[in-house]
Image (cartoon, rainbow, N blue to C red):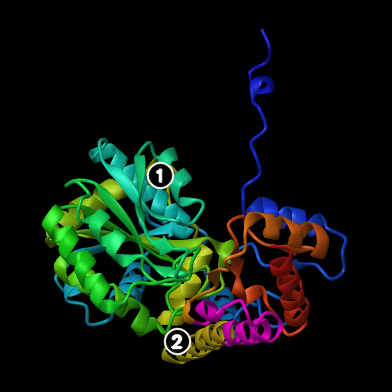
Amino acid sequence: MEPMLSQIDAAPPDPILGLTEAFRQDPAPDKINLGVGVYVDDQGRTPVLASVKEAEARMLESETTKSYLPISGQPAYGKAVQDLILGPDSAVAAAGRAATAHTPGGTGALRVGGDLLRAFFPGATVWVSTPTWANHPGVFAAAGLARRSYPYYDPATRGLDFPAMLAALRDVPAGDVVLLHACCHNPTGVDLAADQWAEVAAAAVDRGWLPFIDFAYQGFGDSVEADRACIQPLLDAVPEALIASSFSKNFGLYRERTGALTVIGGDAEAARRTLSQVKRVVRTNYSNPPAHGGLIVETILADADLTAQWRKELEGMQARIAGVRAQFVEAMARRAPEADFEFIRRQRGMFSFSGLSDAQVDWLREERHIYIVKGGRINVAGITSDNLDALADAVAEALQRG
C-alpha cells in the first residue's frame, strides 16, 4: 500500500497569497505589488503604528503571566470591541444583546461563525456578494455550509447594482444567512448608502434571513464613527446578527491575528446561550485565542491618550488612500483621457476593481512586473510616489493593447 501522505496532491497556489510569493521571487528592481490586501505607506512599508509600539512597551513592563486567556478572550477586550463596532452608547450592548469572542483575526471569526451555523442550522445556505473576498467561499465550504451568490457589482457602471441586489435579497429563504460587507467592500471598493442599508434591513426582517456582517476595514472608509453608522439601520431593525471584525488593517496587526466574533441576540439570554456554543466551537478548534494582539487593542482603547494617537494614525492611513486614489485618477486622465477612471475616486478603502481584463493583468505582470489579482482588483495602498508614474504609463499601454 502506498504511504498515506504520499497520496496527497499539491494544492493550487492561493490566488492572492500565491501572487505575493511570485512577486517576492521576481528579481526585477522596479516591480510593483498591488495584490495582497496589506496597507503600506508611501515608502512601500507596512508600518508598526506608534500607538501600538507604546502599548507594547507598557505591556512588557506590566506583564506578569503567559497563562491562557479565557476561551472567549478577556471581558475587557470584548467590551472594547463592542464599543468600537457598535458605539459606546449602543442600546444593543446596553441591553446585553451583544456577546463577543476574541478570535484569531477576522478570518477566524468567519470560520467560528460558520462552524456555529453548521452545528445548529446545517441546512442553511450562506449567500455572498458577486464578487466577494476570494477566501469567503472557501471558509464557509470548509465549515460544511452551502453557498450561493447575490448580485452586487455592475461592471458597466463600475458601481453597485442595487436593484438586482435588493431583488435577490428579497428572495433569500428564511433561515438562510447573508454575508454583507460593512464598508470598503473587498474587492470592489463599492459600498451601500445609508438608505440602501435600510432597504436591506427591511428585506432581512421581512424574509427572516440572518445577517452576517464582515467588518474588516472600520476607519478606512470615512471614519470609525461613520463606518459603523453604515450598518446601524440594519442592527436597529433585525433581531439577530453575527459580526466578524478585524484589527489587522486599522491597527496594523496583520501578523498578530486579532479579531472578534460578536453575536447579536434577540435578548440577553439568547446572546448568552449563543456565546456558550461559540465557546464550544473555539474549544474544539484552537482552544483559546492568542493574547498579544488583543492586549495591544485593549491597552490602546483603555487609555484616552493612546486612543487619540491611534485615531490620528488611522486617519492618516485613510487620508493617504483617498489621496492616492485621486492622484491615480488624475494621472490616468493625462495619459488615457478616453478612459474614465473617475470611479476609482468614488470607491472607498484599500481595494478597487480597476476594470482591467485578465489579459491586461497578465501583460502587466509579464511585461511590466506589476502584480494585480485576476479580475483586476488592485490594492490602492500599493501605489506610491515612486511608482505612480510607471504604473500609470503601464496601465495606459495595456489599455491601448486591449
Q: Could one spot residue 265 in this view of the protein?
A: no
Under mark 2, the amino acid is Thr
Q: Is residue 342 magenta?
A: yes
Report which residue position mark 1 lands on.
140
Report which residue position mark 2 lands on.
307
Q: Residue at x 62, y 79 (%)?
A: 338
Q: Secondary structure at mark 2?
A: helix
The N terminus: image quadrant: top right
Q: Is residue 388 above or below residue 99?
A: below
Image check: 12 left or right of 176? right
Q: Where in the figure is residue 362, as x and y percent of width and height?
A: 72, 55
Most foreground residue, 147 or 88: 147
Q: Which residues are magenta?
A: 323-345
Marked residue nearer the N-terminal end (2 or 1): 1
Q: Where in the figure is residue 6, as x and y percent of width and height?
A: 69, 21
Q: Residue at x 56, y 63 (%)?
A: 256
